[in-house]
Each structure stands twice: as structure tokens, then as C-alpha cells.
Amino acid sequence: MTSVAEKFRAGRHGIAERWHHAPRWVRWVGIAALIVFFYALPNREFYQWLGPIPTTGSNFGHVLFTVSIYALLAVGLNIVVGFAGLLDLGYFGFFAVGAYTVAVLTSPSSDLSTLWPWLVALPLALGFTMISGVMLGTPTLRLRGDYLAIVTLGFAEMIRIAAQSSEFLRGQRGFNQIPHPPGTYGDGTPIFGVLDPRPYYWLVLTIIILVVIGVRNLNRSRVGRAWVSIREDEDAAQLMGVPTFKFKLWAFAAGAFIGGLAGALFAGKQNFVSSQNLELLNSIIILAAVILGGSGNITGALVGGSLAAYLIERFRGIEVFGIELYEFRFLFFGLILIIMMIFRPQGLIPNRQRAAEFKDRRKEVIVGG
């Protein structure tokens, strides 16, 4: 008798195959409808019909912004972990570099005598974050596996400790009054502000679409093929003439760019940055999000990042028998990850090649057992 799990897998596989073999115009229409759905999502007139999905009250817009930031971070980390196969436990450090660079250059709390406009500070922050990625990768990318993970973990902790103890970075006092992106409505009201998170969500959503297009094209290029060869067998790739160190550095720089972009946008939205924003747990959550969604798949990274942020935030304000469930949010998230690793280790939407590898390994285990 066919089990429920097997029926589910067969149904999901059938849907995936139909989508893959559908005419191009059908897929474009489906993607366009999905994009329209996400742009309409923060409007109360729309999400009030979604039942239990939104969080309570006007908080849903802020949750959507957090979800979009995590999705953007997951896409960036997926380049390093999913495409190039490099275990990075300190990815949130690049987020911190982007956020602090914007804060130092634009905030009145900064010790700089001259403050920079937000539009000038943003590309400077992205450039500095890419440089930090290259600076971290140049001496460390000759390491592999656990050793590389430990070094990247140390990088994130160095950033956190420097932000906490440095007088220039103001420790827990942080930087306030970080300016928002420019732009006003017809009546002179600023588009981007603290009270209404929707413009920020729409901005990040637009950036995610552009980043996904860029990463997708990059992954289909010679660079992407080099990343896959490094992930599968670095020694074999090097013997075949692939300059592995160069392409691993490319992966670190591209991932750092996206992480710094997310940090810069977050700093503008929150209007405040301090060392309290730089917990190591954030790096772990983003890595878990990539694995949850499906390492090596852009769609999987987006789904994993969105789900990780949403599942954590969904428990806010919910009480059961007088117990605030938000206090146990990471317990629930950890249980979900454990269940996923047992029943679907390849992730929700895995890369086809990675999914085939997991299937082959499972057959080997069954046969060997």
C-alpha cells in the first residue's frame, strides 16, 4: 500500500514536472502573478482575506520587511554555501559591515565631521563590504570544511566584539537618526519612514527580484559552472584547470555584496544600529534557512529565508495558558529543522543535482544496512 508520504512526494514531483515542461508563456504568467501577489501582500485590504497567515494588527508590514531581509540574506549565503560549497558560519558579519558603514557615514551620532547623503553612503557601504569579503577570503579560502567554518565564525565574532567595545562604533549606545532613502509623495510627505513599513518592503522586494535575476545569470555562466565543479570535487576541478581560489573568492565577494546590501537597508529602516543587532544566532538562522529551503537552489533559498523569519515572528503576541509562545520560538524552529533533516534532508525545494545525490546516498545506506 502506498504511504501518505509517498503519495505526497509523487504529487509534488508531478507538479514540478508539469511546471518544468509547461510553455514559456505559462511560466511567465505564473511568475508575474506571484510577483503581483507579493507586492499586494502588505495591504490590509488584501491580507485580511488570508485567514491566519498574517500576524496581528499593523505588525504584519514590519514582519514582511523582516522576512524580505532574511530572504535576501539567504540568497547571498546560498552563493557561498549552495553554489560554491563553502561552509560559512559568519555570514551575518557582512550584514553588520554594511549596516555600520551606512550608520557611521550618515548618522549625526557619528564622530565624522562631515556626514554623507544616503545615496552616496550606500554604494560606499557595498564596496567596503565586498572588500571585507575579499580580505577575509584571501588568507582563509585555502582552508576547507570545518576549518573554514571556524575562521568565518571568528570573523563574525570579531565584528561583534569590535562594535561592542569600540568607542568609535559606540557599543550598545549605537547610532541613531540614520537617514532614510530619499523620496517624497506629491504632498511632500517622505515615502520612507518609521511608521509605514510598506515602502521599505516594496523596495527590498524589488531589490530581491533584481538580485535573483543577476545571481541566476551568474550561476548559468562560466563562473557558476566553476562553482558547481568546486562544490562537487575541488581537487578534480583544480586538476581540470579551474582556478579554484579565484572563483571561491568570487563567491565570497558576491555573497558579501548581498549581505552588505541587506545590512544597509536594515539600518535605514530601523533608524538605529547597535552591537545588540549582531548576535551569532542570526548567522546560524540564515544558514539553517538555506538548508531548510534547499541548498544550491535560488527558489529554495528564498523560501527557506522567508519561512525561517516568518516562523520565528509568527509566535509574537500569542499566548497559550498564559505562556508567551514567543519565548519558545527557537525551540519550535529547532524542532522543525530536526523533522526536516529526518524526512527531507535535501530541503523543501532542492537543487535537482543535490536531490539526486541525497537519493543515491540514501539508497547506499539502505543497501549497506
Image (tube, rainbow, N blue to C red):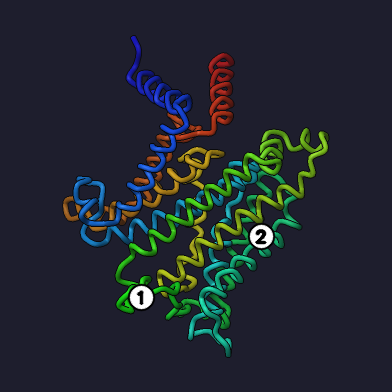
Q: Quadrant of the C terminus?
A: top right
Q: Are marks 1 and 2 in contact (CB under 8 Å)?
A: no
Q: Residue at x 57, y 31 (%)?
A: 354
Q: Which mark is residue 133?
A: 2
Residue 131 in the image, given as x and y percentages of width and height: 68, 64
Mark 1 crowdedness (10 Å alpha carbons): few <14, some 14-19, many ≥20: few
Dot 1: element: loop
Apparent side of residue 142 relative to residue 61 in the rendered image (left or right): right
- Classify 93 as above or below 289: below
Residue 233 visible? The answer is yes
- Classify 359 as above or below 248: above
Dot 2: element: helix
Asked which quadrant contains residue 56, the reply is: bottom left
Residue 72 in the image, given as x and y percentages of width and height: 48, 53
Residue 281 in the image, given as x and y percentages of width and height: 48, 56
Q: Identify residue type, mark 1.
A: Pro
* Front in this rendered view, residue 262 or 235: 262
Q: Residue at x 83, y 35 (%)?
A: 239
Q: Which mark is residue 265?
A: none
Extreme residue toward the left, this view: 321
Name which of mark 1 and mark 2 comes first in the sequence: 2
Residue labelled with disc 1? 190
Inter-mark Cα distance, 1 to 2: 34 Å
